[in-house]
Amino acid sequence: MSVFIIRRLLQSIVVVAVMSLLVFFAVNVVGDPVDMLINPEADQAEIEKTMRAFGLDRPVHEQYWFFLSNAVKGDLGKSFIFGEPALKLIVERMPATLELAFAALLLAVVIALPLGIYAGLKPDSKFSKTIMAGSILGFSLPTFWVGLMMIMVFAVMLGWLPSTGRGETTSLLGIQVSFLTWDGLRHLVLPALNLSLFKMSLTIRVARAATREVVHQDYIKFAHAKGLSSRRVILVHLLKNIMIPVVTVLGLELGGLIAFSVVTETVFAWPGMGKLVIEAIQNLDRPIIVAYLMITVLMFVTINLLVDVLYSVLDPRVRLQDVKA
Amino acid sequence: MTTSVQQISVPAGAPTEAAAVKVQTPFRRFLSDFFESGTAIAAFTVLLVIIFIAVVAPLISPTNPYDLAIVTVLDNRLPPGTRNLDGMTFWLGTDGAGRDLLSAIFYGLRTSLWVGVMSGLIALCIGGTIGLIAAYFGGRTDTLIMRIVDLQLSFPAILIALVLLAVLGKGVDKIIIALVAVQWAYYARTVRASALVERNKEYIEAAICLALGHRRIVFRHLLPNCLAPLIVVGTLQTAHAISLEATLSFLGVGLPITEPSLGLLIANGFEYMLSGRYWISFFPGVALLVTIVSINLVGDQLRDVLNPRLQR
């Protein structure tokens, strides 16, 4: 087990290093670093001072080293617009995005998993066909347009739910969250549902496919034959065995949720880091873009690592194979 | 793939068609399989109509929405079906600048489809070639290419596209570059998977024994036998590209204001939505949705028909 984890950890470190190299080259080689790192309104003296501070008068490999050592110290430059360290701004908005992403993930598990299992158990029933048609629609609908339509129907026409912002937040372990207040919860419903739509469609398909495969296995037949209730067979024997593909997909898609929250946050004016980075791209606020990228890369790599480890816990064959290889 | 289709037996319940089946070519067989499903026929027809509209948009649009001499701000935000003072009827209403929405949608479809199809084709060529090379040469080349593919696929498409566009800026050419960069890995992976199977078959071995050049073997022998999955992925990826372009344009990082795609039209209507003027965002969205759903349905049917394992 530890061999497996160490090997995965080393691979992750390599990925982070490669990505930092790519981000560095995107900012420093493809684009003009002076444009990207220095406030366009700065005067000549200030430009020279910043160039020296970032080491832009040195050769490229030394520059990369400079960028890397600053990044490790947590210094990714100051935002032009806010005048504060970019990393601090991103980290401040992270809880809002994570709250949204986990709420969407929860919805996908609570709503889509049972639907997917049902569709797998009774593939020919009318309800199953409706579920599958819905999941095709969920794949095809562009997230941002669904968000707009949700605002139109639930906020403008019916006036049931608010359409923008996070609402009232409370502090939980020093982090501001909105799901603990009624007002915050009302604000969370539409964005979470919107973000979750694509993942729900995916979960339904994966759960259905896995269920159809598992349901014909001998151990399921045997469990029925020895007189267990279908409830127990489904909740214990079946559920355990379809969890491997479902966990993989949901885990890997958590990264996708965080990236796609850019869209949902823009539509619903949710004050998370996705909205911050879109504004930064529009305002050419480069330090924020770089900081956002490094943070998301780090998050993705961590998520992938955790999924791999979880995967090996759920299915021992994975780690045994890897150690042998 | 094409040779095996002919050997597959005639469907049992169709004795009267037996005479016709004898002269069936693989292509005819494919067509009849494809049009077996009513949904596929409907989706294909809708798709043809959409492509037709996109191609001849300047000829059939009621007005040219980007001709500043015709458009007047006095007509702005008219609800669907309104007639203006000149006797012109706006069937789908007008947007914030007084442009006829129906015409704007026709022009938008043109841009959206162009971006989607072009990026799909270029990505198919690049990704397909890379995938073939990986499968044909194997070994270190294969490992290196697939590591890069896996690394790229572990990051969401929208994130990669956002980064590229943040660096490149706005423009049709730039969004095509970004979409190609996002999509090539899917094609590479698809082609590699089927090329790996074909690689070990006798005809490739025979071609190698004949000492044919690598390029000839890869493109003349290997590629034609890997086309089926490539076509399926190409269709579904084009729908994905159109959706992604719309999303990026909606976020304001895709196309410039001067070349509005459907995504930009929807974004323009966003600010009027809260005051109940739904049509400016609603109708371009419906056009986008119909396009994507019809391409996806055609792609799904293609997958069912072209997949040898599902052959009846």
Image: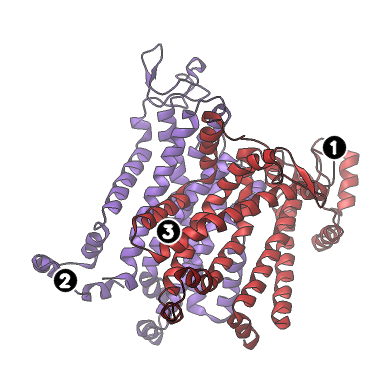
**Residue A42 circle label:** 1
> Mark 3 packing: few (<14 Cα in 10 Å), some, or many (20+)?
many
| Discs 3, 2: same chain | yes
**Disc 2 sits on a residue from what chain?**
B
The residues bearing labels 3 and 1 have C-alpha atoms spaced at a distance of: 48 Å
Left or right: B175, with A1 as reference point: left
Q: Residue A2: image x %, image y %? A: 73, 81
Q: Chain of mark 1?
A: A
Q: Residue at x 49, y 25 (%)?
A: B95
Nearest to the observer: residue B162 or residue B35? B35
Disc 3 is attached to a residue of which chain?
A: B
Quadrant for residue A151, please give it.
top right
Question: Taking the image as drawn, is residue A53 in sight?
Answer: yes
Name the mark on residue B12. Answer: 2
Q: Are marks 3 and 1 on the same chain?
A: no
In the image, taking residue A174 as reference, residue B106 lies left or right, namely left
Residue type at mark 1 is Ala
Q: CA distance from mark 2 to mark 1?
A: 79 Å
Amino acid, disc 3: Gly
Q: Colour of chain A?
A: red
Say which quarter of the image contains residue A322: bottom right
Question: Disc 3 designates what residue?
Answer: B234
Q: In the figure, the purple chain has which letter?
A: B
For mark 3, give the secondary structure. helix
- Label 2 element class: loop
Q: Earlier in the sequence, mark 3 or mark 2?
A: 2
| In the foreground, A279 or A238 | A238
Measuring from the top left, give residue B80's x and y in whole percent: 41, 24
Residue A254, x across and y down, in percent? 62, 58
Which amino acid lies under the numbered mark 2 shown in the image of this protein? Ala
Q: Identify the image quadrant of the N terminus of chain B.
A: bottom left
Task: Specify the quadrant that holds the C terminus of chain B.
Answer: bottom left
